[in-house]
C-alpha cells in the first residue's frame, strides 16, 4: 500500500530497470489493424499534415506529435539537454510564467505531457472538447514559445540530478550504463539520455533554446489527432500550434550503430536474483524480412503465455517469473533482445535453457502450426493493443507516420502478414539467431559452468 | 499492492494506481443512453455488470472474485496470489494452455491480478469471442485440476516473482515492513504476495481448500465492458456461468479491526544500494466502505490538495518554492474493504536533508489542520476528479476496473453513479475536519530508506 517509489517525477529520471525496454526504444513490434478506424489526412493552410480519427462518443480530444531527433541530438558534453527540455514546457511559455501557465492549464482541464527517446521528442495533450480553445492556446505557447526561465531550469535540473545520484549505487542502473557502452561504444546510443551531473551542470537557457529551434520544426514533425474535432477545425488548430515553427530542422547526422555482439559481461553483485540479457542482431522496419522476423520473435519469446521461452523457462521449470524476447527497432540500430531474471543458484541452468531454445529456433525454425497461430495473433492483436483508447490510437498513427508505412497500412497489414512464408521465417531465425550474442549477467557468480 | 500473473503490460493496474479508482460514468454532457450501465444477478448469485462502449469492436471481459490476500488463513500468506497463478493450469475439460491459445488466436490479451481484497481475471477480445471467453472462464471457476506436478514449478515461479518484486528492491522491502507496523491487527499488515517462508510451504491441500471455499458464482462478479449489448451478455452469461452451481454461502468478510493507535512508530532500512534517503509517513484512515458519510470523499480530496500532483501544496511548497525536495506527495487508497492508509512521502534534493523535508511536510499538514484549505483549492481538486472520470471513459478497461473494484469491496453501482454528487458536496470544513481527526502527528508510522552509513555521498 504505502510506497516510497510512487514519486511524481515529471521528468523521467533514469528509472531504468534491466528489463527489455532498457536503453532501447521499444517499438510495438509488428503493428497492424482493422479497417474500422477511419483515418483522414488533414493538411493545414501552412502545410502541416496530420492524421485524424473523428469520434464524438466521448467529449474529448487527444493529440500526439513527435519531432524526430531525440537524445542523439544532445551535443557532446551536454548529455541530458533534450530530456531536461521536456520537463520545461509547462514551466512558462509566451507571456505566462510557470505558475500562470500551470494554473491556466489546470483550469482548462487539459493534461499535457512531453517525453524523449533516443530518436525523438514526443508530446501530447488530452482535453475536454468544450474547453479546446483554452487548451490549444496553451499547447501553442508551449510548443512555439517556451520561455526556459532560469528558475525552472535550475529546479528541474536539480530534480534530475537527484534522480541520477539516487541511482548511483543501484546495481541495475549502473549495469545498464556499462552494458550500453559495451554494446554501442562511442555511438550516441551509448550515452545516458538523462545526462550526468557534470553534463547537466553545463546546460544553459541558450542551449535549450538552440535545441528547441533545431529540433522543433515543421520538417521533422508527425501529428495525429483523435476525438471530437472535425478536419476544418483541426486545420486551424494545426496552424496555431505548429505553424510558426521553423521550416527546416538542423539535426546532426547520426551514424548507423551495429551492436557489438559476441561478448559476455558479468557484473558480479550479491543479489538474490540474477538478471540475464542476450542481444542478437535485429531487422530494421524497412527491411523486406521485418514481418518474418517479427513473427519468429513472437514465437520465440513475444507471446504472453505461449512462447517457447515462456514454456521452457517458466512453465516447465519455474526458473523465472518473466522471460521474453523483443525485436527492437530504433532509427539507427536494430536488435533482438532476450531478457529474464532468474534465481541465482540456477542462473547457469537458465542461461543454458535459453541458449538451447535459441539454437533450436535457429536450426529448425518454427513449425507451420506455430506460424499459423502467430499470424492469427498478430492480425487480431492490433486493434486490441493499439486502438483501445483515443491516446493509443493517436500514438499508433504517429508510429505509422514515423515508420513511413502509409495511411492505408492498417488495411494492407493483414495481407502482408498472411503473405509471409514458413521459409521466410526460418531464414529470419537462421540469420538472427545463428550469431553469437552479447550476454550480460548481473548477479552472483554463476553456480555452475554455462551449458550453452 | 496489485500483483499480476504476468508483469502488467496494459493499463489495468495503472488505472487503479491513479487514485481514481472511484469514478462515475453518468455525466451531464453525454446522452445517458450511450453510457447506461446495466446490472443484474444470475440465479446462482453471480452479479453481472455491462458497460457499453461501441467505439471499437473490442470487449473487455473480467471476472472478479471477492477474495484477496486479506481473506487468507493465518500462516497461509500468499495463497490468494498463488492460486491466481494456478487458475492458468488445466481443467477437467481443457488441458493447460488451451484457454491461452484461444485468446492468442484472435490476438486477444489476458492477465489476472490479486490485491488485498479481490482477485480478477480478464481478457480483451473481439465481441465474437466473448462467448468462448465466458465458457472457458466459467469452466475454470470449478473444474480446475490441481496436481503436485503443476503446483511445484508454479510455486517456484512465484518465489521468483517475490524475489523480483521485493527481495531485490530495498524500497519494496521497507514498504512491506512499514505496512506490517502500520496495521497492528488488520490483515493488510501482510503483503499480498505473502511472506517468503510461508509461500515456500504452500501446497496442493492449501490450494484446493482455498478454491473450494472462494471460487463460486455467488462470490464472483462478471464485468463486461465494450461493444456488446446487455441482452447478449445476459443470454451468454446464463448459458455459461449460469450453469455453474451456487457454492456454499460465505460468511460476511468480518476481519480483525485496528485497535486504537497511541504511538509514533518508525521503521528504518539502510542499504548500500541507496544513495539519497527518502521517507513516507502513514496513518490508518477509513475507506469508502468503513467511513462515515462524506469522510472518504473528504480524504480523497485532501490527498489531492495536499499531495496529488504538481499543483498540490506539497509539490508547490517543497519542490518548487523551497527547493528542498525532488519529490513530495500524498496518497489515499479508498477502495478497500477495511480501514486503509493515508500516506505522505518525500525525498530531499541538493543540500537539503531528509529531516528538513519531513519537517516541511509536517508543516503543510499542520497548516491544513489549523487553517483548512481554500474554496479555490477545493473547487480545482473537484474539477480534476470530474475530469478524470470523463477521461476514464476513453478506456473500457478503466471503466471495468472502476466497477469491479468497487463492487468487489462491498460498494454498489449506485455508489459509483452518485460519487460525483458526493464529491461536489464536500466542504472546506470537512477537509479540515478529516485532516485534524486522522493525521495525528503523534500516531503515525514513518518509514525511512537510508544510504549505508559507511559510504560517503
Image (tube, rainbow, N blue to C red):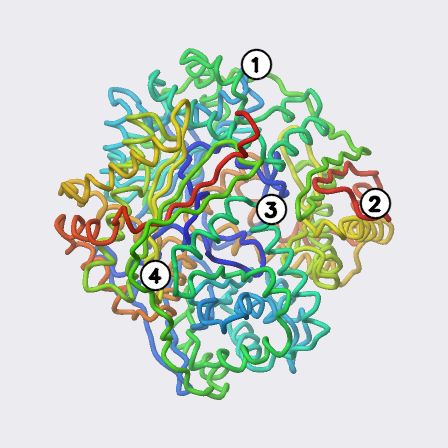
| SS class, disc 3 | loop
Confirm or deny contact between disc 2 and disc 4 (CB under 8 A).
no
Report the side of B208 relative to A258 (left or right).
Answer: left
Residue at which label 2 appears: A430
Confirm or deny contact between disc 1 and disc 4 (CB under 8 A).
no
- Pick whichever, B326 or A179, lies toward us: B326
Mark nearer the viewer, 2 or 4: 4
Residue at point 28%, 44% (across, down)? A128
Q: Residue A429, how many percent across, how many down?
A: 80, 47
Q: Which mark is residue A77?
A: 1
Give the chain letter at badge 1: A
The first of marks 3 and 4 along the sequence is: 3
Residue at which label 4 appears: B335
Confirm or deny contact between disc 3 and disc 4 (CB under 8 A).
no
Q: Residue B84, how many percent across, how many down?
A: 56, 68
Give the chain letter at badge 2: A
Q: CA distance from mark 3 to mark 1?
A: 33 Å
The answer to whether residue A289 shows anywhere in this view is no
Q: Residue A241, how many percent across, how many down?
A: 35, 28
Residue at which label 3 appears: B168
Q: CA distance from mark 2 to mark 3?
A: 36 Å
Q: Are marks 3 and 4 on the same chain?
A: yes
Residue at point 52%, 58% (across, down)? B3
Q: Are marks 1 and 4 on the same chain?
A: no
Q: CA distance from mark 1 to mark 4?
A: 48 Å
Amino acid at each position: 500500500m504505502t510506497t516510497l517509489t510512487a514519486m511524481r517525477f515529471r521528468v523521467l529520471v533514469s528509472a531504468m530497470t534491466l528489463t527489455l525496454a532498457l536503453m532501447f526504444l521499444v517499438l510495438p513490434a509488428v503493428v497492424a489493424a482493422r479497417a474500422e478506424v477511419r483515418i483522414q489526412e488533414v493538411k493545414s493552410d501552412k502545410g502541416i499534415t496530420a492524421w485524424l480519427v473523428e469520434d464524438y462518443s466521448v467529449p474529448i480530444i487527444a493529440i500526439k506529435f513527435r519531432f524526430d531527433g531525440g537524445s542523439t541530438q544532445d551535443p557532446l558534453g551536454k548529455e541530458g539537454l533534450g530530456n531536461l527540455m521536456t520537463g520545461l514546457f509547462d514551466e512558462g511559455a509566451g507571456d505566462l510564467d510557470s505558475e500562470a501557465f500551470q494554473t491556466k492549464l489546470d483550469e482548462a482541464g487539459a493534461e499535457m505531457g512531453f517525453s524523449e527517446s533516443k530518436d525523438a521528442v514526443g508530446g501530447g495533450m488530452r482535453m475536454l472538447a468544450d474547453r479546446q480553445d483554452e487548451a490549444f492556446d496553451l499547447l501553442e505557447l508551449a510548443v512555439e514559445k517556451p520561455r526556459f526561465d532560469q528558475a525552472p531550469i535550475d529546479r528541474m535540473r536539480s530534480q534530475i540530478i537527484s534522480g541520477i545520484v539516487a541511482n548511483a549505487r543501484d546495481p541495475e542502473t549502473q549495469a545498464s550504463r556499462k552494458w550500453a557502452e559495451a554494446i554501442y561504444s562511442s555511438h550516441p546510443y551509448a550515452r545516458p539520455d538523462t545526462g550526468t551531473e557534470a553534463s547537466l551542470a553545463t546546460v544553459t537557457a541558450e542551449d535549450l533554446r538552440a535545441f528547441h529551434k533545431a529540433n522543433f520544426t515543421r520538417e521533422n514533425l508527425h501529428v495525429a489527432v483523435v476525438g471530437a474535432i472535425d478536419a476544418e477545425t483541426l486545420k486551424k488548430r494545426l496552424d496555431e500550434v505548429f505553424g510558426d515553427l521553423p521550416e527546416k530542422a538542423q539535426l546532426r547526422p547520426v551514424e548507423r550503430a551495429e551492436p557489438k555482439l559476441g561478448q559476455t559481461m558479468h557484473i558480479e553483485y550479491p543479489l538474490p536474483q540474477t538478471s540475464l540479457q542476450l542481444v542478437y542482431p535485429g531487422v530494421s522496419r524497412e527491411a523486406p524480412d521485418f514481418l518474418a522476423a517479427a513473427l519468429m520473435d513472437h514465437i520465440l519469446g513475444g507471446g504472453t503465455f505461449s512462447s517457447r521461452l515462456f514454456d521452457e523457462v517458466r512453465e516447465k521449470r519455474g526458473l523465472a517469473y518473466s522471460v521474453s524476447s523483443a525485436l527492437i527497432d530504433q532509427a539507427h540500430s536494430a536488435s533482438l533482445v532476450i531478457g529474464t531474471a532468474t534465481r541465482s543458484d540456477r542462473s547457469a541452468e537458465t542461461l543454458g535453457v535459453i541458449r538451447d531454445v535459441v539454437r533450436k529456433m535457429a536450426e529448425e525454425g518454427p513449425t507451420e502450426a506455430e506460424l499459423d497461430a502467430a499470424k492469427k495473433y498478430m492480425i487480431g492483436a492490433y486493434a486490441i493493443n493499439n486502438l483501445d483508447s483515443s491516446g493509443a490510437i493517436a500514438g499508433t498513427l504517429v508510429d505509422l507516420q514515423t515508420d513511413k508505412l502509409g495511411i492505408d497500412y492498417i488495411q494492407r497489414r493483414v495481407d502482408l502478414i498472411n503473405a509471409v512464408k514458413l521459409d521466410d521465417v526460418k531464414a529470419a531465425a537462421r540469420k538472427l539467431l545463428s550469431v553469437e550474442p552479447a550476454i550480460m549477467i548481473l548477479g552472483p557468480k554463476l553456480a555452475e559452468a554455462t551449458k550453452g | 499492492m496489485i500483483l499480476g500473473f504476468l508483469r502488467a503490460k496494459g493499463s489495468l493496474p495503472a488505472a487503479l494506481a491513479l487514485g481514481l479508482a472511484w469514478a462515475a460514468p453518468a455525466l451531464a454532457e453525454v446522452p445517458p443512453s450511450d453510457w447506461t450501465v446495466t446490472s443484474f444477478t444470475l440465479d446462482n448469485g453471480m452479479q453481472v455488470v455491462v458497460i457499453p462502449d461501441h467505439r471499437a469492436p473490442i470487449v473487455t471481459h473480467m471476472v472478479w472474485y471477492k477474495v484477496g490476500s486479506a481473506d487468507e488463513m493465518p500462516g497461509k500468506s500468499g495463497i490468494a496470489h498463488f492460486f491466481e497463478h494456478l487458475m492458468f493450469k488445466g481443467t477437467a475439460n481443457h488441458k493447460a494452455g488451451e484457454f491461452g491459445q484461444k485468446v492468442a488466436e484472435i490476438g486477444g490479451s489476458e492477465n489476472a491480478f490479486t490485491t488485498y481484497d479481490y482477485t480478477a481475471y480478464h481478457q480483451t477480445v473481439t465481441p465474437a469471442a466473448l462467448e468462448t471467453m465466458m465458457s472457458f472462464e466459467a469452466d475454470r471457476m470449478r473444474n480446475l485440476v490441481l496436481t503436485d506436478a503443476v503446483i511445484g514449478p508454479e510455486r517456484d515461479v512465484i518465489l521468483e516473482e517475490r524475489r523480483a518484486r521485493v527481495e531485490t528492491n530495498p524500497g519494496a522491502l521497507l514498504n512491506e515492513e512499514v505496512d506490517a507496523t502500520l496495521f497492528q491487527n488488520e490483515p493488510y499488515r501482510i503483503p499480498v504476495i505473502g511472506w517468503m517462508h510461508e509461500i515456500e510451504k504452500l501446497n496442493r491441500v492449501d490450494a484446493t481448500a482455498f478454491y473450494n471455499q472462494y471460487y463460486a458464482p455467488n462470490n464472483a462478479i462478471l464485468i463486461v465492458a465494450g461493444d456488446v449489448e446487455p441482452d447478449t451478455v445476459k443470454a451468454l452469461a446464463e448459458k455459461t456461468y449460469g450453469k455453474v452451481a451456487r457454492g456454499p454461502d460465505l460468511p460476511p468478510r468480518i476481519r480483525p479491526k485496528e485497535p486504537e493507535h497511541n504511538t509514533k512508530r518508525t521503521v528504518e532500512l539502510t542499504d548500500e544500494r541507496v544513495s539519497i534517503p527518502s521517507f513516507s509517513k502513514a496513518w490508518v484512515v477509513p475507506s469508502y466502505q468503513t467511513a462515515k458519510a462524506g469522510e472518504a470523499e473528504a480524504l480523497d480530496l485532501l490527498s489531492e490538495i495536499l499531495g496529488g500532483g504538481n499543483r498540490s501544496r506539497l509539490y508547490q511548497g517543497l519542490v518548487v518554492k523551497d527547493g528542498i525536495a525532488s519529490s513530495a506527495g500524498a496518497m489515499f487508497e479508498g477502495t478497500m474493504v477495511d480501514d486503509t492508509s493515508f500516506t505522505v512521502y518525500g525525498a530531499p534534493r541538493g543540500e537539503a536533508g531528509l529531516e528538513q523535508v519531513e519537517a516541511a511536510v509536517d508543516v503543510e499538514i499542520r497548516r491544513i489542520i489549523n487553517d483548512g484549505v481554500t474554496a479555490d483549492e477545493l473547487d480545482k481538486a473537484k474539477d480534476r476528479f470530474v475530469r478524470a472520470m470523463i477521461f476514464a471513459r476513453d478506456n473500457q478497461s478503466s471503466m471495468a476496473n472502476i466497477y469491479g473494484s468497487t463492487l468487489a469491496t462491498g460498494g454498489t453501482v449506485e455508489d459509483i453513479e452518485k460519487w460525483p454528487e458526493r464529491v461536489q458536496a464536500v466542504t472546506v470544513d470537512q477537509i479540515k475536519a478529516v485532516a485534524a481527526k486522522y493525521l495525528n502527528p503523534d500516531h503515525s508510522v514513518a518509514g525511512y530508506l537510508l544510504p549505508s552509513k559507511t559510504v560517503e555521498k
